[in-house]
Amino acid sequence: MTNERPKQMLTPKYRVSYPYVFSPAVDKENGKETYSIQMLFDKKADLTEIKNEVRRLAVEAFGDKAKNAHFPFSDGNEKYNEDPKKYAAYKDVIAVRASSKFQPGVVDGKCVEIISPNEFYAGCYARGKVSGYAWKFMGKYGVKLNLHNLQKMNDGEALAASGRNPADDFDAVESDDSGSVPDSGADLFSSSDKKVDFEL
């Protein structure tokens, strides 16, 4: 291991998904409250700098075992194929997760601070500063991206929290003045991130 400071990198533009940047959410991997974001990159986006840094950190930390490490990149089509309606935005993209125990700063295109989730939301477009770090936990190991700051680039079609169009979930009903409530049901989903192979 070297004492080289983590390299901060500016990402290309991406579509925002699952932004926990104003308040943290419990991280499924470690049970701790964490700020995080899913960055949905077009497959033509130039991620060379980020991939090279992740590769460097993996080899530096794990040597020959680096090829079996976990990485923050996943093929969006895997989620899309699970449920095309819920994960419509994941079709033909590279999904990259970044997280931090500290709240990231968020600004608009003029570098004015954004404090409202209504302005920085799932579906808008942004870029950010990230850095990589190696990790080990309960026999697993890999490289993650640390989230520093974010800049909103422009608006986009908002992604519903469930990713579904409400019109797809319900049938039209007649108005009922009796006060009774019709039977209803809801799908329950359980999914885990699937990692895409990352060649060293």
Image (cartoon, grey):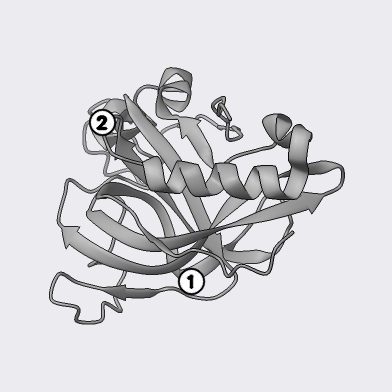
The picture places residue 136, in percent across and down from the top left corner, at 78, 51
Residue type beneath disc 1: Ser
Please indicate whether residue 66 sits to the left or right of residue 83 in the image.
right
As drawn, 192 above or below 7:
above
Q: Residue at x 38, y 31 (%)?
A: 87
Separation of marks 2 and 1 at Cα, in angstroms? 31 Å
The residue lying toward the viewer, choosing from 58 and 116, is 58
Q: Residue 85 carries which label?
A: none
Identify residue for label 2: 44
Q: Which residue is drawn at 28% across and 50% down?
A: 12
Identify residue for label 1: 23
| Number of numbered discs overlaid on the protein picture | 2
The residue lying toward the viewer, choosing from 155 and 200, is 200
Label 2 element class: loop
The residue lying toward the viewer, choosing from 132 and 88, is 132
Q: Residues within 10 Å of mark 2 (few under 14, many from 20)?
A: few
